[in-house]
Image (spheres, rainbow, N blue to C red):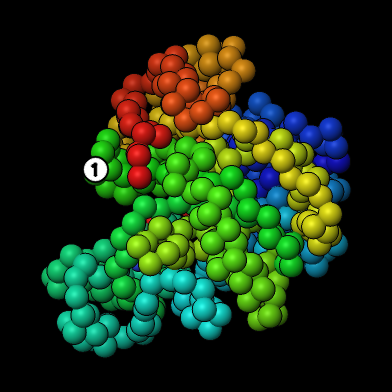
Amino acid sequence: MKVLVVGGGGREHTIVWKIAQSPKVDKIYCAPGNGGIAELAECVPIKATDIEGIVSFAKDNKIDLVMVAPDDPLVMGMVDALEKEGIRAFGPRANAAIIEGSKVFSKELMKKYNIPTAGYEVFDCPQAALEYIKKGSFPTVIKAEGLALGKGVIIAKDLAEAEAGIHDIMEDKVFGESGNRVVIEEFLTGPEVSVLAFCDGKTVVPMVSAQDHKRAYDNDEGLNTGGMGTFSPSRLYDAAKASECMENIFIPTVKAMAQEGRPFKGVLYFGLMMTEKGVKVIEYNARFGDPETQVVLPRLKTDLVEIMEAVIDERLHEINIEWEDNAAVCVVMASGGYPVKYKSGYEITGLDKVAEHKDLTVFHAGTKLDGDKLVTAGGRVLGITAVGKDLDAAIKRAYEGVDMVSFTDCHFRKDIGIKKY
Ligand code: AMP
Ligand code: GLY
């Protein structure tokens, strides 16, 4: 089989790495890929959002399966465009990816089908939004309705912050058209857990749980980032929580989407908060998470290609998906200054040392080849994933891996995996 993976970050490196282990696969392409992916796949310089470019590449190269990993091409309808040309594609169609693409859609879906989430109101005018906020309590949560590179959420602790947030989103349009409408939500508290699930429109099979560390610095200080590290499993997500979520959240969501005429096929990401009043949905994503994938897929025993084909053919109930009884930790090594201002182009050394260890894997996020040197090319540069018998063992190994790698101005958190809640 020939497989094309769309995207070029740490998540896509992990997906390519897993697909490369499948006996069914002869050749992998990745568009656009990155410096690490290039070791496993042929990288083609087509942007992940270039629907026409991807469709014609897949046609010309007789690709048997296209895996669309990032949110924007999914929301833009890349899977629909591929299917129209008779190309098999993994990922939700646009009418289902809207569960991530529009927060108004996802909140209304949850309200209609009684899926537990924070209370909310929707506003399309800044004055009305502010009037509403003035009558409520703080902190309050303001979300741009559309995709905003994971940054469209403002937790306002007082009226001044809320005013500034509404102004930025709705008037200055810092997230573009995503900010035409806002959702104002009740502020919930509790630890957060991510559960990704394979769905074929009817059946939902959750993967092992994960938790991420979003803030730039230790002890969850500093700015929010795309993710400084992850670990799996979560210490909080036990069998009782898993069955509560299956019954109240996962099955109802998949049924709701089918009932709305928007069957969800692909990976559905549940961002969950463990509140005192039970588990609630904080967000849905229509895809594998980054960097959750870097700790979830290394624990998957089953062939990912077999699972993706079962999803496409709507026979997920027929296959048995197995996981290792272990733990995984991913420590992200970033450019100093990320997520604000940072420099790129520094040589990365030591990856050959990591490659000598079977329990360590480097997943590249922002790297590129400069002649025969590998250099930094982004805020998040790479993630070191370690697997171990339990979380403590995996944490220790991940940091041993981090110590083998170096580049100028490198920044990483020293407390990944040790959040006890
Ligand atoms: P989202 O993009 O919707 O996942 O939001 C990003 C982050 O904002 C979440 O991971 C939470 O930490 C926080 N957040 C979102 N919604 C709420 C809420 N209703 N209450 C408290 N925190 C929230
Ligand atoms: N790690 C969160 C996301 O992928 O959106």
- Residue 157 screen position, x and y as percent: 18, 65
| Left or right placement of residue 265 versus residue 208 in this view | right
The residue identified by callout 1 is 221
Camera-nearest residue between 369 and 319: 319
- Residue 88 screen position, x and y as percent: 81, 56
Camera-nearest residue between 388 and 131: 388
- Residue 9 screen position, x and y as percent: 54, 41
Disc 1, SS:
strand
* Picture residue at 54% right of the left edge, 61% below the top: 245
Residue 220 image-quadrant placement: top left
Query: Is residue 349 visible in this depiction of the protein?
Result: no
Q: Which residue, as the protein is rendered here, is positioned at the far front?
A: 240
- Which of the image's four quarters has the N terminus? top right
| Left or right placement of residue 287 versus residue 154 in this view | right
Residue 78 image-quadrant placement: bottom right
Query: Is residue 320 visible in this depiction of the protein?
Result: yes
Count of residue discs: 1
| Left or right placement of residue 200 versus residue 318 in this view | left
Camera-nearest residue between 200 and 24: 200
Q: Amino acid at mark 1?
A: Glu
Looking at the picture, does residue 264 appear above or below residue 198?
Answer: below
* Picture residue at 21% right of the left edge, 67% below the top: 139
* Picture residue at 66% right of the left edge, 81% below the top: 260
Residue 119 image-quadrant placement: bottom left
| Dot 1 alpha-carbon crowd within 10 angstroms: few under 14, some 14 to 19, many 20 or more | few
| Left or right placement of residue 261 versus residue 249 in this view | right
* Picture residue at 35% right of the left edge, 39% below the top: 420
Looking at the picture, does residue 256 appear above or below residue 415?
Answer: below
